[in-house]
Image (cartoon, rainbow, N blue to C red):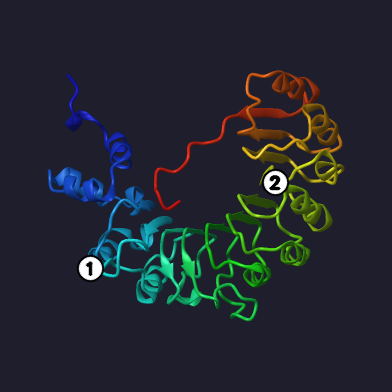
């Protein structure tokens, strides 16, 4: 009978990688071999700390003892709704991440109060920044900020960031390496602000706008005007009509289009109208319809038959987050 001790190091490392951080540290006390494996830099490339309300002292220990130059991506929670006594992310900690983790490329912050944290504290090596249910100050992301901040940033995800508005969206134009922008629940962004910002963000290759107050028609109009080189579009279908979808016809670089429900209206394009518009997009290879209730229906058959050159994905909406604040 094979036991854990019989497994090679590579297999044990793979098993350990699925353990929460706290359990990884605990198993390092089992034996010398496991301690050596827990110290392996491969195990600390991707770290998720959102499961814990972690004291600053513990976080500093993890940073110095385990992560450091090994870290490539990090997810952290800021405990915005945990009360005034909960530990908060500090400028000193974020600056230390940049100094001690020179290979950190992706930072995801969840439910964090960043109103007292300047954007200049973030590690300059970041290529992806995700903010989920975070509070930011009015000074964040404004165009007047230091243009040398986050020079390598390629992707930014802003999901349910209440303070985010037109001025912040226009401020994203200073990130010249930016290629992917995801906006979720950014209800303060207006049609005027979106149109003006996308005009300067014409180099975006991926644009997603989900759960926002703007109609799909007005969003697609701004995209068709200014993002002619975009390769991937994802948006909710609230306010989408056949003429609104038709503005994408002839988009030269579009490879993937995702229309996400569940706000289906009488003006929603029929499957035949969707096929008609998609056939004019020369590079379209993926069409995804999510949460429209078309899976297994005649609509799915029409789409698959009408777009033989595309991968057509018709499926239900993903499960809602179990976190009550999301």
Marks 1 and 2, Cα distance to the nearest angstrom?
42 Å
Q: Position of residue 7 (x, y in %)?
A: 24, 30
Q: Secondary structure at mark 2?
A: strand
Location of residue 116 with respect to 212 vertically, above or below: below
At x 17% / y 26%, what residue is drawn?
Answer: 3
Q: Of tags 1 and 2, which is closer to the observer?
A: 2
At x 36% / y 52%, what residue is drawn?
Answer: 47
- In the image, 135 versus 198, the foreground residue is 135
At x 59% / y 80%, what residue is drawn?
Answer: 146
Q: Position of residue 118 (x, y in %)?
A: 47, 77
Q: Horizontally, is 139 left or right of 294 in the view?
A: left
- In the image, 119 versus 97, the foreground residue is 119
Q: Position of residue 178 (x, y in %)?
A: 64, 62
Q: Horizontally, is 277 left or right of 212 in the view?
A: right
Residue 154, by quadrant, is bottom right
Q: Which mark is residue 57?
A: 1
Numbered circles on residues, count: 2
Q: Residues within 10 Å of mark 2 (few under 14, many from 20)?
A: many
Name the quarter where the N terminus is drawn. Answer: top left
At x 39% / y 75%, what residue is drawn?
Answer: 91
Q: Position of residue 174 (x, y in %)?
A: 66, 72
Q: Which mark is residue 316?
A: none
* Residue at the extreme front of the image, as rendered: 266
Mark 2 lies on residue: 233
Q: Horizontally, is 250 left or right of 308 in the view?
A: right
């Amino acid at each position: 009978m094979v036991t854990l001790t019989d497994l090679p190091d590579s297999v044990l490392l793979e098993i350990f990688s699925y353990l929460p951080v706290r359990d990884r540290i605990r198993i390092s006390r089992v034996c010398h071999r496991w301690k050596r494996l827990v110290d392996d830099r491969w195990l600390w490339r991707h770290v998720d700390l959102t499961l814990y309300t972690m004291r600053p002292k513990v976080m500093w220990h993890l940073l110095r003892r385990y992560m450091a130059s090994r870290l490539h991506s990090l997810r952290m929670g800021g405990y915005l709704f945990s009360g005034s006594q909960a530990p908060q992310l500090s400028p000193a900690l974020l600056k230390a991440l940049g100094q001690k983790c020179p290979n950190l490329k992706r930072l995801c912050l969840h439910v964090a109060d960043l109103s007292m944290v300047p954007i200049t504290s973030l590690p300059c090596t970041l290529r992806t920044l995700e903010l989920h249910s975070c509070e930011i100050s009015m000074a964040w992301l404004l165009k007047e900020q230091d243009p040398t901040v986050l020079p390598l940033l390629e992707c930014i995800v802003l999901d349910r960031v209440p303070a985010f508005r037109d001025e912040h969206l226009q401020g994203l134009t200073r990130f010249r390496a930016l290629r992917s922008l995801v906006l979720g629940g950014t209800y303060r962004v207006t049609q005027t602000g979106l149109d003006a910002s996308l005009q300067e963000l014409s180099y975006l290759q991926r644009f997603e706008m989900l759960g926002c107050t703007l109609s799909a028609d007005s969003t697609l109009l701004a995209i068709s005007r200014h993002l002619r080189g975009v390769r991937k579009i994802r948006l909710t279908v609230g306010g989408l009509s056949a003429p609104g979808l038709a503005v994408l016809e002839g988009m030269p670089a579009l490879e993937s289009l995702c229309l996400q429900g569940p706000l289906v209206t009488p003006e929603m394009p029929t499957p035949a109208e969707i096929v008609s518009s998609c056939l004019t997009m020369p590079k379209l290879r993926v069409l995804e319809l999510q949460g429209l209730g078309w899976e297994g229906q005649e609509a799915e058959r029409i789409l698959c038959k009408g777009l033989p050159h595309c991968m057509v994905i018709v499926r239900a909406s993903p499960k809602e987050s179990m976190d009550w604040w999301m």
